[in-house]
Image (spheres, grey):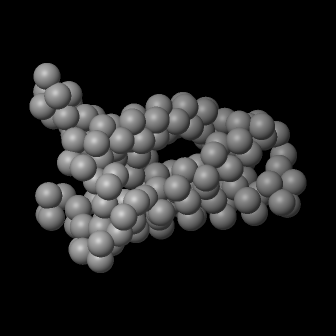
Amino acid sequence: MFDTVTEWAFHIHLIMAISWIGGSVFMFVLGITLRDKKAQQEVYPHVGPIFGWFEVVALVALLSSGAILGMKYGLFSLLFHDNGTPISHALNMKLTLVIVLTVATVVHFVIAYRTNGKERTRKEQLLSRGSSMLIFFLNLFVMHYAIVLRNIL
């Protein structure tokens, strides 16, 4: 039974990671290339909420499936008792990045949700764009450590 759950968890984790990172790249590119204020006001109020809620579901699925995989492979003991091995280092790095990524996502989501269709203050604009950029770059590093872990396992 647990092997079937683990297999599903791995597939869900992989699909959600692809969706999360792909969506993040798309929104990052959209944010950089869509300079016209009027075009932004037409696009973001429609695309943003759909993407935002999908990303919340993806994040919950990633965290849940990651926890299942961590239990299956005994990674939590390595996480809390770092033994200096490559897997222990990669696991600690990935978890640290995921925590920061989750916080940045919550900050970005709250600001985007509260200000959708409204003018943002300078602080909201900086936090929103800064967290968006941080999410984009953190995704690349999380993906790197996920690949390292997968190669070791």
> Residue shown at 73%/59% (left/top)?
127
Picture coordinates of residue 21 (x, y %)?
39, 52
Q: Nearer the viewer, residue 152 or 55?
A: 152
Q: Nearer the viewer, residue 47 or 57?
A: 57
Q: Is residue 140 visible?
A: no
Picture coordinates of residue 93 (x, y %)?
40, 68
Say if 133 sits above or below 71 in the image.
below
Q: Is residue 25 left or right of residue 85?
A: right
Picture coordinates of residue 82 (x, y %)?
35, 69
Determine which quarter of the picture holds residue 104: bottom right
> Residue shown at 74%/45% (left/top)?
111
Name of the residue lying farthest toward the top:
1
> Residue shown at 24%/74% (left/top)?
86
Quarter of the rendering occupied by the N terminus: top left
Q: Is residue 99 left or right of residue 49?
A: left
Quarter of the rendering occupied by the C terminus: bottom left
Say if 79 sits above or below 17 in the image.
below
Q: Is residue 120 left or right of residue 34?
A: right
> Residue shown at 55%/59% (left/top)?
100
